[in-house]
Image: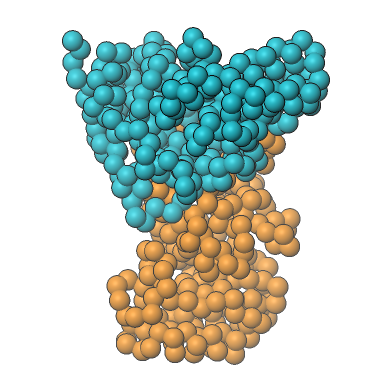
Chain colours: A orange, B cyan
């Protein structure tokens, strides 16, 4: 049995706890999450507890990063289960603010990253990355950690967070952590909970198509041809629709048409009304 | 003779100096400016040196807050004169970054304040407040001062900076300082240097019209009528055009049509190709 994880819900209380740590000269890691925690999140928490004296996990289902018709209302929420699972991992604090603590009614300011925030996910989810950029800026400035941890599962989000922290001079080191996958290859995601058994059997096809395309491109295949083949493979696996399969520069996410520098292949596809994303290093 | 003011030009150097102050437990005030310093700026520096152990003045003519056809190229720049004048006031550091230190080529992120940033000045200078919000966010996060000082001359800017620091949880206290005026009533502004002698004789008419309107409204006059009268007075004084005369809530800058709570009257008008702004408490 581990002790229950202390929880704070207000910025002032969060800052008071962290100020105490700072007074003792301790380093601080922050792990922002929307809850519905799985082994992907736990890997971030482990990385933070290894690299910092103190770790704060945040739990906030951010309304600003859900579009109309998206799943804000149904997104899985179970703080008790999340907190219990975290306790075993040894973070030091859970910060779980209410909506009006994060966004008081007068809140007007937004942070956006034109370009990087408009491509890929940004194209299919308008406003998504402005919501992400705004909440991440707020969380980082509320806590002012030494390091903050984000999964490569949301690879474009990781690139965007790196970009905005550099651009706005937020004094934090952003640490990206590898995707955690099921044995089938399926990338862990809170939204996998939406999948029926039949969809769950199809879902790994996205990961496998990207793995194959990444290997082909790494081996010298034409990028456009590999993208087209992967798109076909994903549809044949049983996905209803492919939003995109794209090969991009791994840092800037600018389109990559030549075999040139570090690249990443990224995709989003629909299984019924569940939208899955995945990506692979090339 | 006072010692020359130390100057830093890089974020890393700024942070190193301030970290040294922090280590000694000293409080820090920041006075952001675009240079071309006058008694208005000096009043901010004095307020900061009185209220903080250490004061850093920043000097950066921010390209992002100038629109096309505006005066970025001709804005008065004379760092040597500014630094010499500041030395007599006793701030501890001048931070004067180059353009590419503030905005490296990859810079993409922007901070905006929809609503507050779209009205009044925002309506007549599209993009202006996004430029202001972005550079102020950066300067505050580069220095992380305890307090930052802004003049009420740019009243809407002051309201916007208060809004964005609250909204983004930037841990700084924003201090607004009263407008400094010439004996004629003309509010001090770096752009007054653009005025010919003849225009300089007309310029105080803006301030006087607002003073009269503020007194009338405070005395119970109809707000719309007072605005119309002030607009006429400004044009009769010799201004070529009035962008706006407006009465707003003093904190939110929402339109104010009733005699209700704290209010502010604000205006912008053109003298030839020089645009002047001013405002008064009601």
* Residue B12 % position (x, y): 27, 38
Q: Is residue A170 visible?
A: no
Residue drawn 55% across and 89% down?
A232
Say whether residue A77 is left or right of residue A18: right
* Residue B158 % position (x, y): 54, 27
Residue drawn 47% across and 76% down?
A246
Q: Is residue B86 above or below residue A134?
A: above
Q: Is residue A69 visible?
A: yes
Q: Viewer-proximal residue, A49 or A70?
A: A70
Q: Residue furthest front?
A: B198
Q: Is residue A118 above or below residue B215?
A: below
Total numbered labels placed on residues in the image: 0
Residue drawn 63% across and 33% down?
B242
Say whether residue A42 is left or right of residue B238: left
Q: Viewer-proximal residue, A260 or B109?
A: B109
* Residue B159 % position (x, y): 58, 29
* Residue B162 % position (x, y): 55, 29
Say whether residue B23 is left or right of residue A146: left
Q: Quadrant of the C terminus of chain A?
A: bottom left
Residue drawn 50% across and 37% down?
B273
Q: Viewer-proximal residue, B174 or A72?
A: B174
């Amino acid at each position: 049995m581990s002790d229950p994880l202390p929880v704070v819900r207000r910025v002032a209380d969060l800052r008071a706890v962290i100020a105490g740590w700072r007074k003792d000269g301790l380093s601080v890691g922050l792990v922002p999450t929307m809850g519905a925690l799985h082994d992907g999140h736990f890997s971030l928490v482990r990385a933070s507890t290894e690299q910092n004296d103190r770790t704060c996990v945040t739990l906030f289902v951010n309304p600003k990063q859900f579009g109309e018709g998206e799943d804000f209302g149904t997104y899985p929420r179970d703080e008790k289960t999340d907190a219990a699972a975290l306790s075993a991992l040894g973070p030091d604090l859970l910060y779980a603010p209410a909506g009006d603590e994060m966004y008081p009614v007068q809140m007007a300011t937004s942070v956006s990253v034109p370009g990087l925030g408009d491509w890929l996910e940004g194209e299919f989810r308008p406003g998504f990355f402005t919501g992400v950029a705004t909440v991440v800026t707020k969380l980082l400035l509320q806590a002012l950690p030494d390091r903050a941890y984000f999964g490569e599962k949301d690879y474009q989000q990781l690139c965007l967070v790196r970009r905005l922290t550099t651009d706005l001079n937020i004094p934090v080191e952003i640490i990206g952590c590898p995707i955690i996958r099921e044995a089938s290859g399926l990338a862990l995601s809170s939204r996998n909970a939406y999948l029926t058994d039949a969809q769950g059997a199809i879902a790994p096809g996205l990961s496998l198509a990207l793995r194959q395309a990444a290997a082909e491109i790494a081996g010298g295949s034409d990028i456009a041809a590999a993208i087209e083949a992967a798109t076909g493979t994903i549809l044949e696996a049983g996905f209803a629709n492919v939003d995109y399969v794209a090969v991009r520069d791994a840092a800037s996410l600018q389109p990559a048409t030549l075999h040139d520098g570090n690249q990443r292949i990224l995709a989003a596809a629909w299984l019924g009304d569940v939208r899955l994303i995945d990506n692979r290093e090339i």
